[in-house]
Image: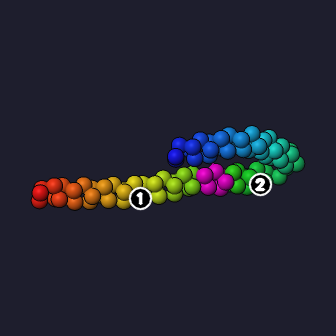
Amino acid sequence: MKSWKVWFVLIVFLAISPELMAQCAMCRGTVESTVSNGRSVVASELNIGILYLLSVPYLLVAAIGYLWYRNSKKEYGQRLEIASRVKRAMSQM
């Protein structure tokens, strides 16, 4: 059931990616026009903005990974508890 969700997310990301790739040419055009006019501050500010926007996906992936780890650890603990209950019940018989 979860595998279709993963495929759905991948297809959505692939469908959106061509639009995201187009931004690079726009940024380059902006930097070239401002640097040729003698304003190099815009280029450095644009680089900072790009790094800021780049950090958000990594933070999202890290948060999702942490939540997944925490939930799987909790589920594993519940499985061990159930297994120990079954083992105790079977030994009392």
Residues in magenta, as a range: 51-57
Residue that lies at the very extreme toward the left in this rendered image: 92
Of callouts 1 and 2, the N-terminal one: 2
| Front of the two marks 1 and 2 | 1
Q: How is the image coloured?
A: rainbow
* 85 relative to 8, above or below: below
| Amino acid under disc 1 | Arg
Label 1: which residue? 70
Membership of 56 in magenta stretch: yes
Image point (40%, 54%), residue name = 72
Label 2: which residue? 41
Image point (31%, 55%), residue name = 79
Q: Pick whichever, 73 or 47, lies toward us.
A: 73
**Badge 2: few (under 14), some or many (20 or more) residues near its Cα, within 10 Å?**
few
Distance between mark 1 and mark 2 Cα atoms = 44 Å
Secondary element at tag 2? helix
Membership of 64 in magenta stretch: no
Q: Give coordinates of residue 39: x percent, y percent.
A: 82, 52
Q: Main secondary structure of the magenta part?
A: helix
Relative placement, left or right, of 84 versus 42 is left
